[in-house]
Image (cartoon, rainbow, N blue to C red):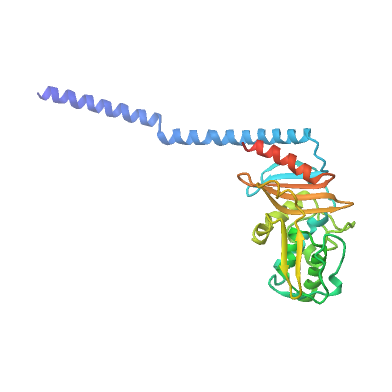
Amino acid sequence: MKKVFLIIILVLSTFIVIYSLGNTAYSPSVEKSSIRALPEELTVKDQALNNLALQSQLDELNIRSKSYLVYEEGSGQILAQKSPDNPISVASLTKLMTALVIIEGADIDDSYTVTSEGLILINPVLRLQQGDTVNVKDLVKSILIGSANDAALTLGVYYKQATGQDIIEAMNNKAEKLEMHATRYNNPIGFDSDTNYSNANDIRKLLEYLDQYPIFQEVSRMNSYSFTSARTTYNIEATNKLISRFSDLEAVKTGFTNDAAGAMVVKLRTDPKTVIIVLNSADREGDIIQIRRQLLDFYK
């Protein structure tokens, strides 16, 4: 009986030793670590290949824009680009900075009585009335949605009265703080000037900063805007005509002048969202539609 018992103990001990050696040679923690690392490496490689494929596809299309930038919101990963460092006239994309300095430097809930200094009849306009009292936030929304030129000029006059500082100085100071080194402003509207320009990479820096302010998200799907002042009701149509056609697009800003040609910034509701910046295009809407189509294929 003792002999049988000793044999059983010996067999069990041998099994335990073999099991322990097997676990040491093939540790579950090592296996888990190896499996986790490999897909990460493949993901980075595949992402790079996908980006090259997307860029190649866009290069083959008739993209009219002289400069564009496509990147993922959040990660900032660039998916495609063309001359993003070239300084260029950006037209009413200028109004993004106009809105920002008002939001940060003045009181957006303030009321202001319109003066003749802020009146202009170059479309698009609200046709503001001298002596009428309006809300500053309504003017900001009007320049973001409908690119109202008289609202932008009036905001510049208001800013000087409210802060004692010229709005152009404030806009250029903010651009410097955001390290927008290829950007210069000389009017709050975006009219053509040798000293009013930016580039796609600088606009990206501005957009990333603007994301902290809800007002830019609030207006992103609005096809028009109206508000009531002390005297009347003002209305303006959205300059981005694509959001009424495509439910997956969000408007950020449009622009057009003779020098700048067509400019447009939109966000596409992919996961994560994709930002598309198109500058100096003879067909800004057509360019956005083509880029959108390729991006939807890219994210399938």
Quarter of the rendering containing residue 72: top right
Residue 248 vs residue 94, the one in the foreground: 248
Quarter of the figure that contains the C terminus: top right
Q: Is residue 219 left or right of residue 155?
A: left
Splitting the image into 4 quarters, where does residue 193 fall? bottom right
Instruction: Please state the horizontal and vertical placement of residue 187, each as a whole percent of the image.
Output: 84, 63
Work out whether residue 221 can be spotted: yes
Residue 229 % position (x, y): 74, 72
Quarter holding residue 191? bottom right
Q: Is residue 25 left or right of residue 285?
A: left
Give x and y (percent) for residue 275.
69, 47
Residue at point 40%, 33% (across, down): 27
Residue drawn where x is 40% and y is 29% of the image: 25
Which residue lies most toward the left here?
A: 1
Q: Tell me if I can see residue 96 in this picture.
A: no
Tell me which residue sits at (65%, 49%) in the image: 73
Q: Quadrant of the N terminus?
A: top left
- Residue at horizontal 87%, vertical 66%? 120
Relative to 246, does residue 207 appear above or below in the rendering?
A: below
Most foreground residue, 264 or 50? 264
Q: Where does residue 271 sit, x and y in percent of width and height?
A: 60, 44
User: Image height check: is 222 above or below 117?
Assistant: above
Q: How many marks?
A: 0
